[in-house]
Amino acid sequence: MQTLLQNALEKRSDLIKLILGAFILSISTCLIGNFLNDNYKKSVLLIAVLLALIVFIFLIYTFLGNCKNSITIEAIVPLDKECKCVYDIFRYEFSKKLRETLKAVFIENEAFKKIWEEQFESKNSNENELKKNKTIERNKGNEKEFNDNPVEYYSVVKVVGEEEKKTKSEKLLEEALEYIFIDELSLNLSSFFQKKETEDNILKEYDRNDFPKILLDNRIINMLSTPFSDRQIFSKIKMKPPDGGEIIFITGTDGSMYSRFNLVLPIGSKVSRIKDGHIRVENKRIVLDLLINYTKFYSNFPVGFQYNYLGIEKENLDSRKLIITLNAKIKPLSLLTNFGWEYHKWIDSFISSLEKFCSFEYFIKEIDWESNLTRIIISNQKEEIQNNFKKEKK
């Protein structure tokens, strides 16, 4: 959200650019007029045309800068070390969907479950070794100061150079995240275009057969979108859609899941997986890049949140930072066309819905955590005063 000062400074900058452009263009026009009337040298005409081109290019460059937008959303991946799963934070929809997705994957594929749980086993062994070493160090010597006040040090390390190789569990998590965000895109598109007729010659419903590379590169998308009639886990169920209908989603009480892979987009759109964690939606008018960056860095919860809202101890939960970047761009030449832009407004709708879905900052504001924490503190203080008062009376 822009502040009053930012808005005023931007308008001032635009005004200065406009005045400067108009001044240079007037000089150019004057030189061209003089050349035509008084037969000036050709060099004068060349200078005049050059000045006009400079203004023209400058205005185009300024205009094109407004055709791009980049938004960064910070989410968190809460990992419960006790159950070796994603922790479902109440009302934080992103954590719930990630947990359910991984649960569905692990029920159907034991190998994936084993890969996922190995990361927790290695962490636990490292933590146990660290605790053991601390105990040994504290038993060495009889230095009173060291024993009474042991000092621990923590460091933040920045690694410069080649990107660290992903572990199998991190690769699996990345594929799950891609599935979640593509599924959110699918839901948003279906909702946005719900009022428009499916037979519309501007729209097309793309299914899994239109994206063979995405299915090949992402095992989770491929698994959960495979028709349920071809999956053993659903072999016992007998479901038939009504005439003219189609089953688009199935979930079992055991956590199993089927989700039809479909995207309703303007004709000519392409959805591609550029690389790990990079999904692109592109057509003749717009380009949307969705970049998912699982940083491995710890993300701190707000003060008092873990104990008072989650009701768990700090040692049981790891919260990792996830950065989602959305780069949207309108292709300049497409702006010459005035028809059909209502079919591309989904991009703003998706960006807005994605922020509500996974932004942890938005979630904290939505539950009004700062106000609630203040109430908790006041309530605790009041209870403590009352208890002290009762003790004094006794």
Image (cartoon, helix red, strand yellow):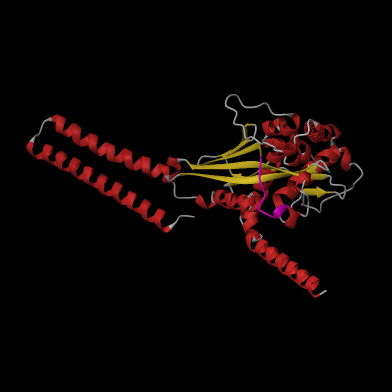
Q: What's the magenta region?
A: 298-306
Residue 270 percent coordinates (x, y): 59, 37
Q: Does residue 354 appear anywhere in the picture?
A: yes
Residue occupying the point 37% across, 43% down: 62
Q: Quadrant of residue 213?
A: top right
Residue 206 percent coordinates (x, y): 66, 42
Residue lying at the far right of the rendered structure? 236
Q: Does residue 194 appear anywhere in the picture?
A: no
Residue occupying the point 74% across, 52% down: 89
Q: Is residue 300 magenta?
A: yes
Number of marks present in the image shown: 0
Q: Nearer the viewer, residue 340 or 325?
A: 325
**With respect to residue 48, does 300 lie above or below?**
below
Residue lying at the far bottom of the rendered structure? 393
Q: Nearer the viewer, residue 325 or 284?
A: 325
Q: Quadrant of residue 153?
A: top right
> What secondary structure is the stretch in magenta mostly built from?
loop
Q: Is residue 335 magenta?
A: no
Residue lying at the far left of the rendered structure? 38
Horizontal side of residue 265 vs 85, given as left or right: left
